[in-house]
């Protein structure tokens, strides 16, 4: 059974304030919160 709807509800910089922040920015890494619903 799959999902009937999925959407990104928030995006954020998951490496902000860490030693890997520069690398994450270079490659466009972002975190995301996803809301997904199952049928029924």
Image (cartoon, rainbow, N blue to C red):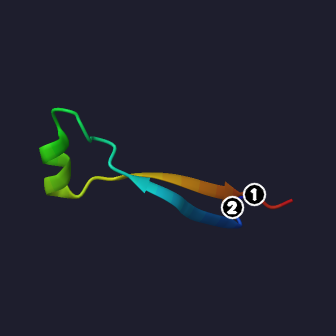
Foreground pick, 40 / 2: 40
Residue 15 picture location, percent across and down: 27, 41
Q: Which residue is mark 1?
A: 38
Other residues around mark 2 within 10 Å, as few (<14) / some (14–19) / many (≥20): few
Q: CA distance from mark 2 to mark 1?
A: 5 Å
Foreground pick, 4 / 28: 28
Instruction: Specify whether 10 is left or right of 12.
Output: right
Q: Is residue 39 above or below residue 15?
A: below
**SS class of the residue under badge 1?**
loop
Q: Which quadrant: the N terminus? A: bottom right
Q: Residue at x 67, y 67 (%)?
A: 5
Residue 4 picture location, percent across and down: 71, 67
Q: Earlier in the sequence, mark 2 or mark 1?
A: 2
Q: Is residue 26 above or below residue 7?
A: above
Residue at the far right in the pictured view: 40
Residue 38 picture location, percent across and down: 75, 57
Instruction: Specify whether 9 is left or right of 19.
Output: right
Instruction: Specify whether 32 is left or right of 15.
Output: right
Q: Which residue is mark 2?
A: 3
Other residues around mark 1 within 10 Å, as few (<14) / some (14–19) / many (≥20): few
Q: Residue at x 26, y 41 (%)?
A: 16
Instruction: Specify whether 12 is left or right of 1.
Output: left
Q: Which quadrant: the C terminus? A: bottom right
In which quarter of the view is residue 18 placed?
A: top left
Q: Residue at x 55, y 59 (%)?
A: 9
Q: Is residue 14 above or below residue 27?
A: above
Residue 22 picture location, percent across and down: 12, 46
Circles 2 and 1, Cβ within 8 Å, touching? The answer is yes
Residue at the far front in the pictured view: 17
């Amino acid at each position: 059974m799959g999902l009937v709807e999925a959407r990104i509800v928030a995006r954020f910089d998951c490496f902000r304030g860490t030693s890997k922040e520069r690398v994450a920015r270079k490659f466009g890494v972002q975190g995301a919160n996803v809301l997904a619903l199952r049928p029924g």
